[in-house]
Each structure stands twice: as C-alpha cells, then as structure tokens.
C-alpha cells in the first residue's frame, strides 16, 4: 500500500505536469487565434493601421507547421498516456484495496474464531474449577464435622478413663494381703490400656483430619484464585475484546470509498 501510495503521488505529479503543458498550449493557441482573428478582420479602413518597415524581412517564428502540429499532438498523446497510466494505477489500487479488505475480513473472522474457542475453553475451565471448588467446600465441611466428632469422642473417652484410673488408684489402698492382683485388677488395667489406645488412635485420626483440613483450605484458596483469574480472563476476552469486535467496517469503507 505504501508503494502504491508513492506511485500515486508520482502519477499525480505527472498528471499535473501534463495538465500544465496542455493548459499552456491551449493558452498559446487562444492567444494566437485571437491575434489571427484580428488580422483576418483588418480592412483598409480599420483603425490602428501603420507602416512597419522591414517587418517582412523578419522571421520571428519558432516552429514550422509540421513541428507546430507535432507539438500539440505530442502534448495530447502524453496526456492520454498519463490518463491511461492513471486508470491502470486506479484499477491496481482498487484491486489491492479489495484484496486487502478480503484479507482483513479473513483475519477478522479467524481472530473471532480464536477468541470464541478461547472463551469456550476458559468457560469450561471456569466451570470445572467451580465444580471442584464446590466439592472442596463440601469436603471441608465434612472434614470439619469429622474433627468435631473426633474431639467429642476424645472428650467422651476422658470420663471413663478417669473412672478406670481412679478405681485402680483406689484399690492400691487395700491393706496388706488384700492388695491382690486379682481379676478386677487385670480387667481395670486392660480397660485403661484399651481406653488409652483408643484415645491415641482418635488423636492420630484427629491430627490426620486437621492436616487434611489444612490441605483442603489451601486447595480452596488456590481454586478461588484460579477461578478469579479465569473470570477476569473471560471478562477481558468476552466483554472487553469481543464487544469491540461485534461489527466490521463495510467493504466500501475498507476500499476507500465514501
């Protein structure tokens, strides 16, 4: 397009030069015709007649009939040549503008298709993130409920442990030979150990649940951040960019016509 613009500027200069030559030739011929017309109408009784001695020996002419005719013919041929060159250049420029318009439309459509695909991909990713976030929130809720259940179970185990340990401690006060390692003693020891083992397992399960909850919370934060990024990307592509690409200039406007 820049090359054609440069050619158009050069052609315009050539056209103006040809116009100038035609106008000058035309002006000269009008002046000559006016002079010859006055000469044609001179009579013996005309005003302004005078003697101009020796004028018949002067030859002020700069051309012959052949060169005079050729000069005008050359100007006409040159102007015709420039008009033809201008016509060809206009046709080339119109073809170029039409091709450029078609290419721009092709690129416009291609870019819109890419935008639509990207928006669809981002929407799918956003929906997937929302689904995972909902499941993560549900997992967080269930884990929190599990933690509360484990804490309650630990609290519930404390009184029985106190009872069993208190019974053992009380039985250590039996006097003399009554301090016997009997079946109740063995059963109380076994009960304390069972309760302590259960409490240890509950504490381990509680620690695992708390670690799981921390991981779920971190996952939730990450999903929310990613979801925010995807929502922002959708807003930029769908609302900002595509809103500016809803229309495309008409073909006459693209090819430079009004």
Image: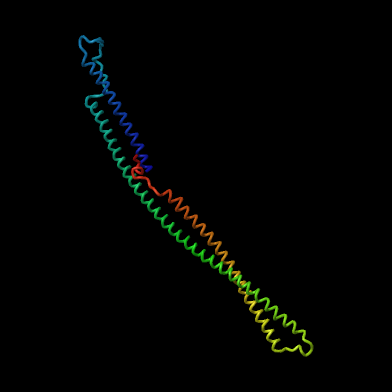
| Residue positioned 55% across, 63% down in the render | 220
- Residue drawn at 43 percent across, 58 percent down: 120
Q: Residue furthest bottom?
A: 177
**Vertical comparison of 33 with 243: above or below:** above
Q: Position of residue 141 (x, y in %)?
A: 56, 67
Residue 47, picture quadrant: top left
Q: Residue furthest right?
A: 176
Q: Nearer the viewer, residue 70 or 214?
A: 214
Residue 85 vertical position relative to residue 116 in the rendered view, above or below: above
Quadrant housing the N terminus: top left
Residue 51, percent from left and from top: 25, 10
- In the image, is 12 to the left or to the right of 37? right
Corner quadrant of residue 3: top left
Count of marks, rendered view: 0
Q: In which quadrant of the rendered image does the C terminus lie?
A: top left
Q: Is residue 30 left or right of residue 229?
A: left
Q: Nearer the viewer, residue 93 or 20?
A: 93
At horizontal 45% and vertical 61% (from top left) the residue drawn is 124
Q: Nearer the viewer, residue 218 or 175?
A: 175
Instruction: Residue at 28%, 35% (x, y): give it.
Output: 83
Image x and y of residue 161, in percent: 68, 78
Which quadrant of the structure image shows residue 4?
A: top left
In this figure, which colouring scheme has been used for the structure? rainbow
Where residue 35 appears, as percent x and y from the top left, is: 25, 18
């Amino acid at each position: 397009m820049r090359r054609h613009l440069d050619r158009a500027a050069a052609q315009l200069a050539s056209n103006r030069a040809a116009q100038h030559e035609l106008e000058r030739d035309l002006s000269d011929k009008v002046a000559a015709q006016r002079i010859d017309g006055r000469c044609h109408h001179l009579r013996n009784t005309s005003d302004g007649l005078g003697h101009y001695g020796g004028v018949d020996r002067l030859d002020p002419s700069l051309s012959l009939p052949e060169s005079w005719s050729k000069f005008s013919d050359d100007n006409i041929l040159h102007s015709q040549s420039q008009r033809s060159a201008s016509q060809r250049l206009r046709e080339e420029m119109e073809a170029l503008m039409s091709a450029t318009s078609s290419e721009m439309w092709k690129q416009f459509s291609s870019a819109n298709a890419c935008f639509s695909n990207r928006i669809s991909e981002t929407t799918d990713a956003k929906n997937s993130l929302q689904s995972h976030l909902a499941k993560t929130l549900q997992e967080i809720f269930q884990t929190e409920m599990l933690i509360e259940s484990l804490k309650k179970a630990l609290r519930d185990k404390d009184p029985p442990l106190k009872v069993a340990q208190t019974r053992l401690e009380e039985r250590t006060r039996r006097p003399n030979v009554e301090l016997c390692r009997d079946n109740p003693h063995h059963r109380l020891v076994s009960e304390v150990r069972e309760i302590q083992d259960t409490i240890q397992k509950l504490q381990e399960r509680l620690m695992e649940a708390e670690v799981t909850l921390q991981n779920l919370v971190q996952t939730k934060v990450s999903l929310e951040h990613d979801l925010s990024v995807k929502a922002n990307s959708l807003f930029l592509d769908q609302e900002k960019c595509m809103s500016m690409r809803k229309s495309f200039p008409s073909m006459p406007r693209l090819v430079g016509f009004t």
